[in-house]
Each structure stands twice: as C-alpha cells, then as structure tokens.
Amino acid sequence: MTAFVWADTTGADFASTGANQFLIRASGGVGIGLANPVAALDVAGTVRATAFTGNGAGLAGLNADNLASGTVVDARLSPNIPRLDANQTFTGVVGLANPANSFTGNGAGLTTLNASQLASGTVADGRLSANAPRLNGSATFAGTVSAARFSGAGAMDWQVVSGTAQQAQPNTGYLLTNDTQVVVTLPTSPNPGGIVRVSGVGTGGWRITQNSSQLVLAKNLPGTFGTSWTPRDSVRDWRSVASSTDGTKLVALVSGGQIYTSTDSGVTWTPRDSSRTWSSVASSTDGTKLVAAVSGGQIYTSTDSGATWTPRDSSRGWFSVASSSDGTKLVAVDGFGSGSGGQIHTSTDSGVTWAADGSSQDWSSVASSADGSKLVAVVNGGQIYTFTDSDATLTPRESNRSWRSVASSADGSKLVAVADGGQIYTYSSADPPGTTGYLLGDQLSAIELQYIGNGQFMPLSHEGTIIAY
C-alpha cells in the first residue's frame, strides 16, 4: 500500500487508512505560499477546484453573476428590492417599454392616470363627474344646446291634420291639408315656453281660436295691421291728426275750427289755439314739437305742445304734413284737390327752410312707424291702406270714406284716422282676449306661437297672410 503521511508532534497516532492517500496533520495549519497560516489550509493565491462543498458562510467577494443555480431567499435581498407579497412604494417612474406588457390586479391605489389611454372597457356612471349628464336622468344645461334635430319629450312633434278641427297641444306642429278652413284651438293649460306651430297647405286656410282668458299678441303680424277701428269724440269737420311715439298723446285739427289734443289715446279731447283753416298736423316723438299746415296759409310750428305757434314758409294750399321722431325732419304736401295733386316739400331744420320735390300723388295723408317699416295712408273718398316691409304690398282697410288724415304710433300698433264730415277712428293691434279673438291664415301661410304665461301667446315666426280678429 502506497500512501504519504505527514504528522506533527501530536502524540496520537496518525496513519493511512487506504492506498494512494496524501495525509497531513498540522495543528499549526498548512500554509501554501505562507509561513504563518491562520487556518487549517491557508493559501496565498488562487485555489481552483472542479467543485466546492461544505459551509460557504465564510466566503467573501462572491460574484453574483456566477450564481448558476438555487434561489436567493428574500432575507438576503436589499430593502430596496420590492416583494410580490407586500405593498410597494416607488419613488421613481415605473414604465413598461414593451407594448405587450400590462398591469394586472387591483389598481385602486394608482393616481394621475391618463384618461386618453383608456383602450378598452367602460367607465361606470359612478366614476363620471357630476357635470356629465346621464341618459337615464334629468339634465339642466346652463348654456345653449344645439342639434340638427331633437326628438323625444319636449321636442317638436309634427302631426298631419286632414280634418277641419284640431285641439292643439304644447310643443306640437300641425300640417293642415283640408281644402276647407281648419279650426285649431290653442292648448288649454300650456306651460310657459310651450310652442305651437301651424302650417296650412289646404286651400281653405286655417283659423286659430283662443280659450277663455287667452290672448295672442298679434301686433307684429303684417296681415293684422289696421283691421279694427273704434269711433271717438263727436262728428266734426276733422282735417288732420298726429300721435306721439307711445300713442297716448294725440293732436287733431278741425278745418275752420280749433286744434284738439288728447293724452289718453283719444278717449277724451281738449280744444286748443284759435280757429283756422287747418289742414294737417304732425308731432315729434314726445309730443312737444308740432307742425301744422293751414290751407291757403302758412305752415306753423310749436315747441310747447301747441301753446304757441310760429309761421313758416309761404302761404300755399298746404294739405298734409309729417314729422320725424325728433321733430327736425318735416315733410308737407300742397295743392291737393287741384286734380293733379301738389308737390312734396321737405325740411331738415324743424321747418325753418323747405325744399320742394316734384313727385305728387292723390293721397290725402300718410304716416309712418318710427323705423319706417309700417306705413298707413288714406285716400279722400277712398279707403285706408296699410303697408309693411314683410308683405311689401298696400292692403285696403276699412270702408270708403272722406278720409283726410292718419297718424301712427312708433311701432305701428296704434293708428288714428279722421273722416271729413265723419268721426275719429282708432285702431289697436291687440287681439281681443278669450274665445272672441282668433287668427286667420290663408293657404301656404304658417305661424309659430310660444306661450309666455298669464294666458298670452307670442308669435315667434310667420309666413304668408295672417290676420288677427
């Protein structure tokens, strides 16, 4: 048996136990490249082996790159390493560079999420702001809601009516097809803001009737202008009238008599000034500036509602005058009754100077609303005629009389006219309230009414000829 045994001075036996052994017993340690070993084997250099076994607790300077097997337990990891079984707080940004990566699990703790990155799923109603309306609830918008078409409750629903009578409902449109006049009765108990639309395609036209205590504010309907008149005061040889903007202050002339004024829209009248052959008078907006013409005499102006008068221009056969709202622009005609009419004279300085215009007509008087969109004119021995920009035609009103003068309020809703040898006639566009008042429309006429409360309907739009009675 071949073996190598080296023993120190320790007294116990130290012998080989098998062949081919190399045994060393050195209680002072074995040093390789060292004269003072401090361990059983102390090597000054690199030790290389196919494998190492045993307790490696004393190893230092280990390279983590050379861990080829096994698992590093959690206890051996740094506190800076997150654990799957614990809550984690990252002080930096956590990013997923690969689009295929994803987070799973409960994301309740995530903050500052970007809503534009929601690629799937549905956001529950409870997660939406209170400012986001819900389809299954009521919504009140602070601004204007616009759409190409509205449907559902509150939207306009159109119905085709082939019969001759229809009870209207709020927020409903009616297309009337009958060739006999169709009677449409306004809703009985609408809410403010409710809309009714009527469009007539049948040759019979339509009639809108009111319920008790209801009223259509029809003064701006062109076909309604000048339909009904009420006689005032006594029979006199009236020649001319004029009105303030609001229609409450009126002034009227009697040929060979006095000037009469009224402050209650013509209900009562007071005589003014001296008797003259007055032929025409006009008033400023507030009723303080007046201009009056004397047939065969001069034009007179007043700045104190008729208390004093100043003669202007020359003596002519003055027949009619009119004034702008501020009383600076005046117009007058002379020579009426000559068979060829007279000229029109204009002034831009409250009547101090006048310029003649060559045109002439067989009208005896004319008046205008403040904006000029509504005119009313009278023909001596003929009728009253009204004109509005919307229908652009002169429409005859009332009967043939010896009309001499006419005047209008600023908005054209109140008119007053006088007839030679007859009475004063006044017109107000207010539709009679209740069941006595109604609207009439021709074929291809249409109207949209909105209920504004207190039993009143206001026209929003209209087309064709519509008359209020």
Image (cartoon, helix red, strand yellow):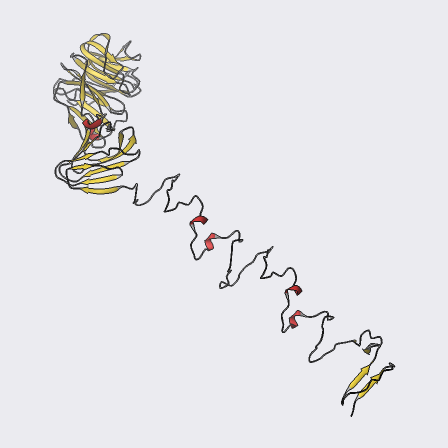
Residue 118 image-quadrant placement: bottom left
Q: Which residue does the image show at 81% across and 82% down from the upper left?
A: 24
Tally the numbered discs.
Answer: 0
Asked if residue 74 shows in the view, the reply is yes
Residue 128 drawn above or below residue 314: below
Residue 445 rendering spot, x and y as whole percentages: 19, 36
Residue 315 image-quadrant placement: top left
Residue 272 drawn above or below residue 451: above
Q: Residue furthest bottom?
A: 1
Residue 47 drawn above or below residue 393: below
Q: Which of 36 and 347 is in front in this view?
A: 36
Asked if residue 295 shows in the view, the reply is no
Q: In which quarter of the image is the C terminus?
A: top left
Q: Which of 378 and 266 is in front in this view?
A: 266
Residue 2 rendering spot, x and y as whole percentages: 78, 91
Residue 428 drawn above or below residue 171: above
Q: Nearer the viewer, residue 232 or 347?
A: 232
Residue 181 image-quadrant placement: top left
Residue 25 rendering spot, x and y as whole percentages: 82, 81
Apparent side of residue 378 relative to residue 50 in the rendered image (left or right): left
Residue 293 rendering spot, x and y as whole percentages: 22, 14
Q: Nearer the viewer, residue 188 or 149?
A: 188
Q: Which residue does the image show at 42% across and 54% down from the upper left?
A: 122
Q: Quadrant of the N terminus?
A: bottom right
Q: Which residue lies furthest to the front in this view?
A: 12
Apparent side of residue 56 relative to residue 451 in the rendered image (left or right): right
